[in-house]
Image (tube, coloured by chain):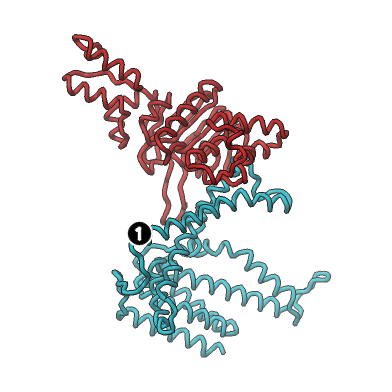
Amino acid sequence: MHIEAHNVSLSYQEGTPFEFKAVSGVDLAFAPGERIGIAGPVGSGKSTLLALLAGIMAPTSGDVAHDGRKLGRKPLPGPGSLGFAFQSPENCLFEKTVHDDVAFAPRALGLKAEEVNRLTKEALACVGLDVERFGSRSPFSLSLGEQRRVALAGLLAMRPRVLLLDEPTAHLDPLCRHDIIERLVRLNDETGVTVVMVGHDMDEMAHFSKRLVIMDGGRVAADDDSGRLLSDRNLLERYSLRLPGTVELCHLLGEATGGIVAPVLDEPAAVELLFQMAGGAEGASCS
Amino acid sequence: MQLSSVTIGQYYPGTSLLHRIDPRIKIMAAFAYVIVLFLVHGFGPLALLAAILLAGILFAGIPAVWLLRSLRPMLILLLITFFFQLLFRGGEELARLGPVALYREGLEQGAFLVTRLVFLVLSGFILTFTTPPVLLTDAFGRMISPLEKIRIPSYELALMMTIALRFIPLLLMELDRIIKAQRARGASIGTGGLLRRARAVMPVLIPLFVMSFRHADELALAMESRCYRGGKGRTMRRKLRFGWRDAVFTAVAAAALSTSLWIGI
């Protein structure tokens, strides 16, 4: 699904003294199959932008279009090809069992029982939960990480072509965070589902995103190849974002050796770099 | 509709004359105004009450548009009131269309009641628009503090009010989010037949309940951990003082209201 935003703005409490412009004049286009991260300082309009792109909120001015079809001022009526999650989507779990909660969307879509069961099982497997073990449990008896997985499975069960997730790993333990990011990457790689994620953790972003959009003050401050933006120390600092660990490492190595070390974005590359520097007389990556 | 943008009686920051009046006086004045409003009859005193209201609006420095906009949620109630009076009051016939007759008494009574309701709401709005909620509950707590003598916990009552007021916008915001999130999952909220609608409430109600209990729990824990022990021995940073401005305001308000009462009864 193509998602396009043309000059999109949104003000909260418009026309009152409390008016606050969360998003102003944003132009963006996401192609099918992309893996996009949205980052930026607190209050930069990331979450609002995501809700606008999903059609969950209607812009005060400008247009959002899905596959060229303008959404207009009314929010999307129903589910289907697009899965959207606010922060902490586990807050919206409500059914008696995990299975029923995940099956809620496919049932609402009017699918047959066996189809619903198949989708539910697949969706749960996709987030790393076994339907035999978890299916009959109450969602309220689960840990936070498991609840988050159930909530994400609830979206996946609709078989969306686009996933828009607002900080899907917030408040989770490191292992669970890593696993969820890994699964999102795999989902995108294997099925070509567009995944857009708002996030604060630049290590996760380095791992997850191919393309990165940096928001600041409601506007798009940068929109480029993720690797390029995440290696740009000055840029990230300007928008109070932390460098990914490996980039920081390269920077420190550069300072220590008095040269410039080309930044790398994942751990295996960093290990290789360290080996090279330790083994090679000149330091292969120093220049 | 954006539920979170509901602004009924929301504080309007400012430094107008009314903003600076002691909130206790304002509460009492609004209260007295409402009592007079319901005691008087006839359009004469109503006109005087309208003048008082207008003066209040002017001294509060609130844009009239904003005030009128906050009346919007009441529109249906006002219309229903008006038409009920119009239809179910007998008297002197003014016009007739088939079985439906228009009576003078109905028209008058309808207009009178609607005006009364509008004034009632507006007087309340002037109070809440010019007084931050915290001050409002603070003042309320102090006004009922003499009741401590008969063991009515005034401070706790005021605190409950503050918390309740604080939670309304919070819960509305969450409700808005939950509705949107569940809609995105295919919940059909606010459409379909009665049974369908009733069933569709569950995906919204259960998360909202869970959430409010969690908030209450967290708030209680936070208060405990900061050694909250009720109002006993508590001192206030903000001290309410009755100044010359308040005295003048009280005198003028009392004069205006008793005049309306005098000509209206």
Q: Is residue A78 visible?
A: no
Q: Which residue is mark 1?
A: B225
Image height check: is B221 above or below A247? below
Whole-percent x and y of residue B53?
A: 48, 75
A46 vs B98, left or right, is left
Front residue of A171/B199: it is A171
Number of labels in the image equals 1
Image height check: is A75 above or below B164? above
* Mark 1 element type: helix
Identified by mark 1, the residue type is Ser
Which of the chains is cyan? B
Q: Chain of mark 1?
A: B
Front residue of B111/B198: it is B198
Whole-percent x and y of residue A10?
A: 47, 44
**Chain A colour?**
red
Image height check: is B122 above or below A252? below
A281 vs B164, left or right, is left
Front residue of A155/A260: it is A155
Could you classify mark 1 by the number of other residues whose Cα lies within 10 Å: few (under 14), some (14-19), or many (20 or more)?
few
Q: Is residue B200 visible?
A: yes
A31 vs B135, left or right, is right
Which residue does the image show at 51% across and 62% down from the upper left? B8
Whole-percent x and y of residue A196?
A: 48, 31
